[in-house]
Image: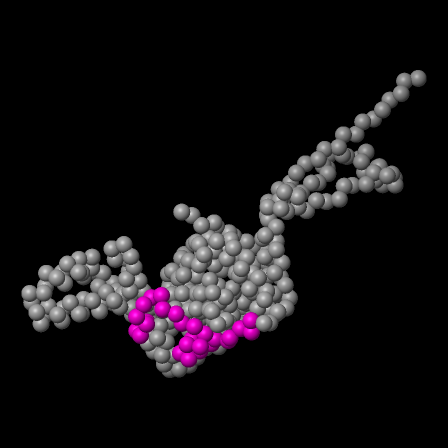
Amino acid sequence: MEERYECCVCFFVFFQAEDGIRDLVRSRGLGDVYKRQVDSGSDVVPAPAVTKTPLFQAQNADRYARQALIREYEAATGANLIVMIDQIFAPGITFLEELLIGLDPSQDLHVLLSTPGGDGEVAVRMVRAMQARCSKLTMIIPDMAKSAGTIMCLGADTILMAAQSDLGPVDPQFPVGRGLVGAKEIVSALETAEQRVSQQPNSYPLYAGLLADVNMLMIEQAKAAMDRTTALIDEALQCRTTQLPDDERSRLVEALKRPLIDDLTDHSATVGPKLAQKIGLPVELADTSSATWRIVWQLWTRYFALGCFPLNRAAVYEGRLASQFYPATA
């Protein structure tokens, strides 16, 4: 008597998950034979789903650990937390938007920010986008948020700073020679040169040589940039959840303009938490012994170890779901 055997071949295929995870899934090609085996109570048991392969898990372990800390912070505070460590320029708006997608606008938003500065116009756009996705915006400054980063902080409802935290001047900078020079220094240098030459005409060749890298167009641009920076301070203040009356906001703009533009003699000058409070910024001093600040500091040190500013120029935009990391380039 001839015996006949039916053969069933199982196929396994890999499907690429959206974050790069490779999931092992049994093929649908098993057909009715497989279904009858399962339905008939046989011992065939489907393999458990694999959500992350060991290599992928190992390659992304640091990111998972950071995002676990973000979720821990959110559970402790009831606020959404995102991280932005980068220079402030236009491409960052898209990276920021990735972090804001899906956030509940009825919840508070906390932003762990570290930046050397960048474009003030972009800073206002960013803080406007943040404020549109939350009920109250808090900037957390574990290290520094300089220049355009300070403009961004002006649009927050609260700025959380520790003793070592630092804001800075917001005066615009121009490339002169091989470095950057403040707009007010360019204007001041020209005014000084004009005064000295009018008093001592034979000093003209000296000052002409000293100001060889400065032209009239640059001077006019410097004057316009200084006026625009004052307007950016005003626009950032208008982003706050609680709107100030126009006359009160105008007084605050003038009060901030003096210490952040006029009085500070160097663009790298420091504005610590006590000075920031004194000049009218909504600064809260962090309790560095609290459980929430310990989470903040654990997060910060992980980003610092990645080579983020100020250690190096690596950039990161990260939340509990989205993550963009860009290593420092030479």
User: Could you say where residue 116 lies in the image, as x and y percent from the top left?
Assistant: 41, 61
Q: Which residues are magenta?
A: 261-288
In the rendered image, the residue lying farthest to the right is: 1
How many circles with numbers are drawn on the protein? 0
The stretch drawn in magenta includes residue 324: no
Residue toward you, 101 or 113: 113
Residue shown at 40% from the left, 78% from the top: 279
Q: Is residue 201 left or right of residue 92?
A: left
Residue 252 in view (yes/no) = yes
Quarter containing the N terminus = top right
> Looking at the rendering, which quadrant does residue 27 occupy?
top right
Q: Is residue 46 above or below residue 217?
A: above
Residue shown at 47% from the left, 49% from the top: 327
Colour mapping = one colour
Residue shown at 80% from the left, 27% from the top: 7
> Looking at the rendering, which quadrant does residue 310 occupy?
bottom left
Q: Is residue 82 left or right of residue 44?
A: left
Residue toward you, 35 or 116: 116
User: Could you say where residue 204 lies in the image, as x and y percent from the top left?
Assistant: 10, 63
Residue toward you, 136 or 282: 282
Q: Mainly helix, strand or loop, the magenta region?
A: loop
Q: Is residue 76 left or right of residue 252?
A: right
User: Could you say where residue 128 lies in the image, as x and y percent from the top left?
Assistant: 45, 66
